[in-house]
Amino acid sequence: MFPKKLIFVAFVSLGLALPVSGQDAAKGAFLKGDIVYGSATAPVEIIEYGSMTCPHCGHFGGDIFPQVKKELVDTGKVRFVFRNFVRDRYDIAVASISRCTSDVNVTKALLHDYFSRQEDWMRASNPYEVIASIAEEHGVSRAEVGRCMSDQEVQTHLIEVTQDGIKTYQIERIPFFLVNGKHLQNYSFEAIKAAVDAEG
């Protein structure tokens, strides 16, 4: 199981290890809470807890979720909810950058690219450089990247979401999925579709 105290201690001081200028650290908007795809009236709700540095999460986010969105979310069958589950410094950096906006569509685009290009930035000699470059492609400046990675409010929110997931659902492995409140262990598209159909 993920140790709750260790997660908190490891991340609450992360911003202090990322040197940025006073201007970069200026407060800005950030997107709090669930990242939601689809209609609130959809008959089935899927909740995912995922980590930006988890390879299985990257595979789902980059390869499987686009099909889930096209065939289940966009057709009105599913409301899909994404919640960050932070585990390490790169995870919380990318999660923070993805949420440092008031535009949920920018957040969704960043999440997709960070998942689909996970190997590019995780295996880079300087991961932060690639992380920042991807952010720039979506209109997030280097200054904003620095601010986001040092924002204690964003980090605390991400930690709280992670801790709540552990406490509420006893999460031991990620990605972690709930389909109308029921834990789904197999997250292939076929398994997800079958679970959705069973709820219909």
Image (tube, rainbow, N blue to C red):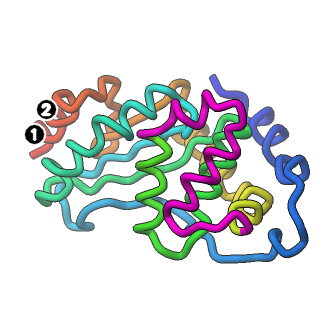
Residue position for label 1: 197
**Image-based side of 32 in relation to 4, left or right:** left
Using the image as rendered, state which of residue 136 and residue 165 is in the foreground: 136
Q: Could you tell me which secondary element the residue under label 2 belongs to?
A: helix
Q: Residue drawn 10% across and 39% down? A: 197
Using the image as rendered, state which of residue 65 and residue 34 is in the foreground: 65
Above-or-below relation of 171 to 80:
above
Q: Position of residue 98 (x, y in %)?
A: 56, 58
Above-or-below relation of 153 to 129:
below
Q: Position of residue 44 (x, y in %)?
A: 21, 51
Report, in whole angstroms, how far the alpha carbon at label 2 lies from the one at label 1.
5 Å
Using the image as rendered, state which of residue 23 and residue 181 is in the foreground: 23
Q: Residues within 10 Å of mark 2 (few under 14, many from 20)?
A: few
**Image-based side of 131 in relation to 188, left or right:** right
Q: Could you tell me which secondary element the residue under label 1 belongs to?
A: helix
Q: Residue drawn 21% across and 32% down? A: 189
Q: Which residues are magenta?
A: 116-143
Query: Are the residues at dot 2 and dot 1 in contact (C-beta closer than 8 Å)?
Result: yes
Residue position for label 2: 194
Q: Is residue 64 magenta?
A: no
**Image-based side of 37 in relation to 105, left or right:** left
Q: Residue drawn 39% across and 30% down? A: 59
**Image-based side of 128 in relation to 103, left or right:** right
Q: Name the kind of residue labelled 2 in the image.
A: Ala
User: What kind of secondary structure does the magenta stretch mostly adopt?
Assistant: helix
Q: Name the kind of residue labelled 1 in the image.
A: Asp
Q: Residues within 10 Å of mark 1 (few under 14, many from 20)?
A: few
